Structure formats: structure tokens, C-alpha cells
Amino acid sequence: MRILDRYIIRYYLINFVVLLAVFTLLFIVVDMMFNFDEFLDAGRNNSGQWGSMVAATVAAILDYYGPLSALLYVFFAGIIALGAMGFTFATFVRTGELGAMVSSGVSMFRIAAPILVVGFFLNAATLVDQEFVLPRLASKLTREASQVSRETAKPFRVHYTVDHNGRLLSVSSFDSNGPAMQGVTILIRSDKGMALQRITADRGTWDAAREGGGWLLTGVVATERDVAGPAGSAVNATHEETMFFPTDLSPEVLIARQESIYPRLLSMPELMRLAKNPAVDTGQIRQIMHSRFSLLVLNLLVLVMGLPFFLTREPVNMLLQGVKAAAVCLGAWGGGLVMMQVSTGQMQPALSAWLPVVIYLPVSAMLLMRVRT
């Protein structure tokens, strides 16, 4: 049986690698058609560094799509594993090898066992990718194609974001590379929302060493409003060289509010720290943490759902079986992803993340019972 297992696994891994390469290259080619001008601009700007415009353009393309390939594996590993299984068993049926295996007394389930085991490890590799690879590439994955020559995302504006104390933070330019911000305005309000104090600063840098964390502001002007006086009147305008502003609006929170994909690029320890921050939607963060594992189970269930279409004792039209399997499995996979994105305000984060597994577990078991062995 070990010889047979190695034979099946070898075919399966070859098909998986081929499909992964074809899908990744296809995605890159299609996406490059829309962004090629941006890579040419990056090539012209960096031609002196690389010696020629062609070399600089190729370097820009690799710098952009290299990290993106790691992200594509996380989202599509389950579907590629399903396709590799279909091609493997379609080949065995076409050559008569599957019939020969069954005739020798090997159960259909025993034949499928190596596929399920290897499929589990191929999908489990997404967890390694998410924990150790994507967090290191998060700054590059949040870039647009027009920012390919930068190591990090383009600085952006922050428009009066509220922290847990009700204070409003506005920044003319926030650069995650520092992290640092320019043109800082802070409004401190009363319980009724009335502005009591306005603080402006030329620059702010994040200081995580102090308890709770906060922004170290330089070039500060603090203006207090005269509540008893007429509207717009102010007193006690003070100038300070530096000021520490404690807040839960950390760089991670600001980036997460700007880039919706950013929390999904963080590791589990980083997500756990972010979930403790009251300035973010903790329900969404917990849903992301649960869905990281539920997606693995969903991919395995989709793989199991596809097995009955190819585990057959007699020759059948494999093209028709493949179409049926694609309709059922792709529909289940897509529906599962949609269910995982259900707003956590409507249900518990854990329930939202594991809902596809709860639904598809009996469905996959019922389909697997159809296998005649």
C-alpha cells in the first residue's frame, strides 16, 4: 500500500503544482494588463539603480507580484487542491488504473485517503503562510500598483477619527513606515460633544514604550475654548516643544481603518493584541481569528464533497463529472466565503465564522455515502 500511496501522492502533487503555477501566472498576466503602465513608470524611475529600464521594470513586477502570490495561495489553495484531485482521479479513470485498484481489493475510501491527508497539509500550509509570511509582507500587500516603487503604502489622510475617550484625531499625512504623522489636529470634547480644547502639532511619532501607548507630538499649540464666553472665543493658547498624547489610536488601528484587508494580514498574536483595543471592531477581529481555522476545515469539506464525482468503479464521462463537481464545490466554497463575511453585528463572531462548516459537514457526509466501494 505504501507504493500505491506514493504513486497517488506523486500524481496529486504534480497536478497541484501545475495548477497553482497556471492559476498564479494567469492572475498575474490579467492583472498586469491593467497596471503595466505603472510598472513602466517604476522602471523609468529606478533605471539608474538597476542599470537599465528593462531590469528595473522586471524588478518592479517581481516586487509587486511576489508578495501577492503568497496572498493568493491563502485564498485559493482549497480550490486548487480540489482541481488537482479531479485531474488525478480523471487520469486514473481514463487509464483504467482506478478500476484495477478496486479489482485488487482496495477500497475506494482507502484510495482517497492519501489525497485527503496531503490535501489537509496543503491547506494547513495557509496557516503557516498567514502566521509567518504575510505579516512580514503586510506593508507591501497594502500598496497599490501605482506605489510599486515604494516599500510601504502611500501616506494617507486621517479625517477626525474618534478614540475611546471621544477625542477626535485628524492628520494631514500619516506614513506607516515611521510610523509618523504630519499636520496633527486633536479636538478634546465634553460629554455633550462640545469642543473644549484644540491641539495642533507639526509632527507626531508613536511611542509604545509608555503605558498604554500614545503619540509624542512636537511643535504643539494647545488652545482652550472659553465655554462661558461668546462662540469662537479662546483663552490660554500655549506653545510647547513636545507633548505626549495617550490614545488607543495606534498605527495598527489607523491602518486597519484605512485598509480593510490589513487585519487579515496580521499574525494571531498581533490580532489578539488588536482585539484588546477598544478603538477597533473587536467582533470583526475575532471573526477573522476564527475564520482562519474555519477556512481550513471548509476547504477540506469541499475536497470531500468533490470525491464522489470521481470515485467511480466503471468508466464515465469525466468531463461531465468535472462540470458537476465544479458546480457543486465552487458553489459551496463561494457560499462559505460569503457566510464568513456576515456582519458580526447580526450574529456572534464565532458562529459567523463556523457557520459554513456546520452546514457543509452533513452535506459532505451525505455525498460521501454515495461512493460505491
Image: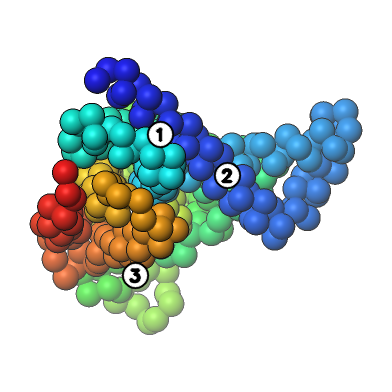
Q: Are marks 3 and 2 in contact (CB under 8 Å)?
A: no
Which of 197/41 is in front?
Answer: 41
| Residue bearing the label numbered 3 | 195
Q: Earlier in the sequence, mark 3 or mark 2?
A: 2
Q: Give the residue displayed 44% in from the left and 58% down from the top.
A: 319
Q: Percent position (x, y) of residue 156?
A: 55, 56
Which mark lies nearer to you, 3 or 2? 2
Residue 35 falls left or right of residue 299: right
Amino acid, disc 2: Val
Which mark lies nearer to you, 3 or 1? 1
Crowd rating for badge 2 (residues with CA inside 10 Å; few <14, some 14–19, many 20+): few
Label for residue 22? 2
The answer to whether residue 175 shows anywhere in this view is no
Q: Earlier in the sequence, mark 3 or mark 1?
A: 1
Amino acid, disc 3: Ala
| Residue bearing the label numbered 1 | 12
Q: Give the residue displayed 42% in from the left and 74% down from the top.
A: 233
Vertical order, 57 against 187 (above or below): above
Q: Secondary structure at mark 3?
A: strand
**Gap in angstroms between the C-alphas marked 3 and 1:** 65 Å
Residue 353 occupies quadrant = bottom left
Residue 239 falls left or right of residue 365: right
Vertical order, 136 against 360 (above or below): above
Which of 324/258 is in front?
Answer: 324
Amino acid, disc 1: Tyr
Q: Give the residue displayed 37% in from the left and 35% down from the top.
A: 97
